[in-house]
Amino acid sequence: MDNESDASLTALLERAAPHTAARFPHVIRRLAGTWADPEACRAFFHSLLVDVSPGQQGFPLDVMLELMHLSEHYEIGLSNDREGDAWSANEPML
């Protein structure tokens, strides 16, 4: 991803997750940096939402909800990319 695209994605994520951006800007930057790599992005979401390392306090509820929403949005986008649209999925029948 080029710098302009990365900056646009970062800005979009900041708007979608304002509490996360305000309190944990490094999380937004890392999400933007891994967004184009499904394996890396899923691993990062997992580390944010599931991993409980010793001594970690966890995120405030508003941040956790934003991260869960972003993760869900990401998975839906990947699913749509794999399936294609309704027209291409049904081309063999046409």
Image (spheres, helix red, strand yellow):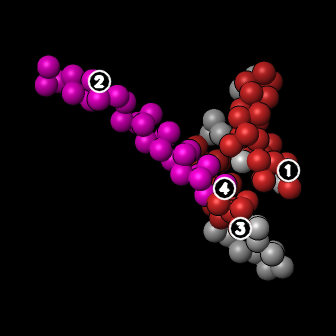
Name the residue that disc number 1 marks.
22
Q: Distance between the Cα atoms at labels 3 and 1?
A: 14 Å
Counting residues from the start of the chain, the first of labels 2 and 3 encountered is 3
Q: How crowded is mark 4: few (under 14 residues within 10 Å), some or many (20 or more)?
A: many
Q: Do the residues labelled 2 and 1 touch (CB within 8 Å)?
A: no
Q: How crowded is mark 1: few (under 14 residues within 10 Å), some or many (20 or more)?
A: few
- Gap between marks 2 and 1, in whole Å? 41 Å
Q: Of the residues under marks 3 and 4, which one precedes in the sequence?
A: 3
Which tag is nearer the camera, tag 2 or tag 3? Answer: 3
Residue 82 against residue 21 in the figure, above or below: above
- Rendered location of residue 93, percent (x, y): 13, 25
Looking at the image, is 73 positioned above or below residue 43?
above
Label 4 – label 1 distance at C-alpha: 13 Å
In percent of the image, x 78 and y 21: which residue is there? Answer: 4
Mark 3 lies on a secondary structure that is helix
Q: Is mark 1 on a helix, strand or loop?
A: helix
User: Mark 3 belongs to which amino acid?
Assistant: Leu
Q: In percent of the image, x 62 and y 49: which residue is there?
A: 70
**Residue that mark 2 sits on:** 88
Q: Distance between the residues labelled 2 and 3?
A: 40 Å
The amino acid marked with disc number 1 is Ala
Give amino acid for label 2. Ser
